[in-house]
Amino acid sequence: MEAKWLVRDKNFYKKLFLLALPMAGQSILTFSVGLADNIMVGQLGDTALSGVYMANQWMTLLQKFVTGFSTASLVLATQYWGRRDTESIKTIIAMTAKFCLACSLIFFVLAFFFPRFVLGMYTNEEAVIEESIRYMQIVCISYLFYCVTEVLMTSMKCVETVGIGLYISICTLIVNVGLNYVLIFGRLGMPALGIRGAAVATLAARVLEAVIMLYYVKVKDHKLNLVLRDIFRHSRILLKDYIHYGIPIFAGSAVWGLNMTVQSAIFGRLGESAISAVSISNNLFNIISVAMYGVSSATGIIIGKTVGSGDYERVKQYAKTLQLVFVGMGIVTALLMYGSHWLIPVLYPTILPETAEVTYQLICVLSIMVLGTAYQVSCLTGIVRAGGCTHFVFVNDTIFVCCVLIPSGLIAAFVLGAPAWVVFACLKCDQLLKCIVAVIKVNRFKWIKNITRDAAAVQKG
């Protein structure tokens, strides 16, 4: 039976909304913390703003690696949740925790002991590097706490418990913004620490996140009932599946992280105005696009669970309806993105006129590219990858990064000497081009793969 374009089951839309809303809310609060940092540090001048942005690129790279491991576990575990096999989910989470904690330790050591080497990859602006070092050597302590929170939050997403992320983000926003105000500018009798104050505020927020998440998983969760000794769980069969299906996801996330590193390095050599403009425009984009990414994340949970249950006809119906939802989200997000340019002089009154002009140009580029982002990201990661076809997204991303984005960006910046917005457009053009790939891939439905195993076989392994 051919899948219809619109699902008529109201429970589907209710489930999509109930999953997407708290994740979108969590994202908007999380990105609000970044925006608050951006705005407050922006009061210290373009150099400080650029310094924090460049230091955070190392954290962004770590996030991509950790997200790769977490998403791999999510794709595998949500299908087991469709069968209500919580023992296998616990084992998957244990493996993810080990990978993520090892990764965070490596990033911490490099950031704390070799910050100049790390930052030298992103920019050759000496003033920016000096500011970045002052921020990075404090904020890098938060890497371990971030990984603990991310792994535990992923374990809850696997079993459709997504509300806790929203509550944690509310607490984080209050603590981070409050401490930013006190420590950056020296309020309430505290010394004005400037950029270091922003780093301390971020560290405190990360510690709070981890503590709350540990308490919730230990005391409040009744679906998985995770305990500390679960981290020693292991299964050769599940590890084999994790590597087979998870490595492409991790590798894809790592490739994307390296792509962002190269992009930051390109802009890091175009001057402080370009760096600050990218920082501002990206922060505005993160806030405005939260609903789009919330729907994409909810899609992954719904598709993974439904594939795991074996109802493939329902999966096809969901996939067709969700594509219409993605297009609608893209149009709304594009309009909001363009309208955000009016906020530049309000939120950043002290930036240079040149920086403000470049920021407006980058926002215009993002307003166009987001139309493609809303559709192709949600299709390829929310549907195709969650459906079990994990290799395709990795191969597709790698081809675009290596053959389109980085070469065009390097040529535009250093051969043609093009203005910042042209370079930016070259580095974002895949968001539209991938839509062609997404339309063809999703609607062939060859991505539907049940990757679960029988519970007895897992326990035996």
Image: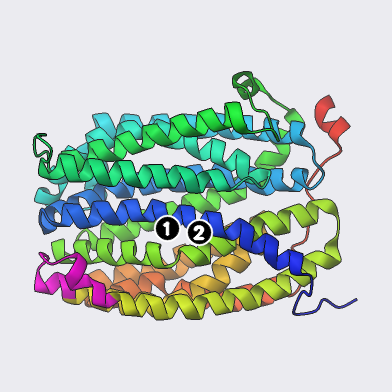
Q: Secondary structure at mark 2?
A: helix
Q: Picture coordinates of residue 280 (x, y %)?
A: 26, 64
Q: Main secondary structure of the magenta part?
A: helix
Q: Quadrant of residue 226?
A: top right
The vertical placement of 218 against 406, above or below, is above
- Farthest front residue? 188
Q: Is residue 328 in sight in this rendering? A: yes
> Toward the viewer: 44 or 67?
44
Which of the two residues, 202 or 231, is positioned nearer the viewer here? 202
Q: Is residue 400 above or below residue 338?
A: above
Does 416 lie within the magenta span?
no
Q: In terms of image quadrants, where is residue 362?
A: bottom left
- Quadrant for the N terminus in the image: bottom right
Crowd class of label 2 (few under 14; some 14 to 19; many from 20; radius 10 Å): many
How many marks the image carries: the answer is: 2
Q: Please report the residue visible at 62 percent of the width from the left and 22 percent of the height from the top.
A: 227
Image quadrant in which the C terminus is located: top right
Q: Please, is residue 37 above or below residue 272 in the view? A: above
Where residue 244 sits: x, y (%)?
69, 44
Left/right of residue 373 with respect to residue 452 in the rendered view: left
- Region rendered in magenta: 341-356
Q: Nearer the viewer, residue 387 or 82?
A: 82
Q: Which mark is residue 167?
A: none
Which residue type does callout 2 highlight?
Ala
Give how far across and how far down residue 8 sits, in percent.
79, 75
Question: What amino acid does circle 1 point to?
Answer: Ile
Q: Is residue 446 visible?
A: no
Residue at mark 2 = 24
Badge 1 element: helix
Look at mark 1 in the image and give the residue it sits on: 28
The answer to whether mark 1 and mark 2 are in CB contact below 8 A is: yes
Frontmost residue, 153 versus 103: 153
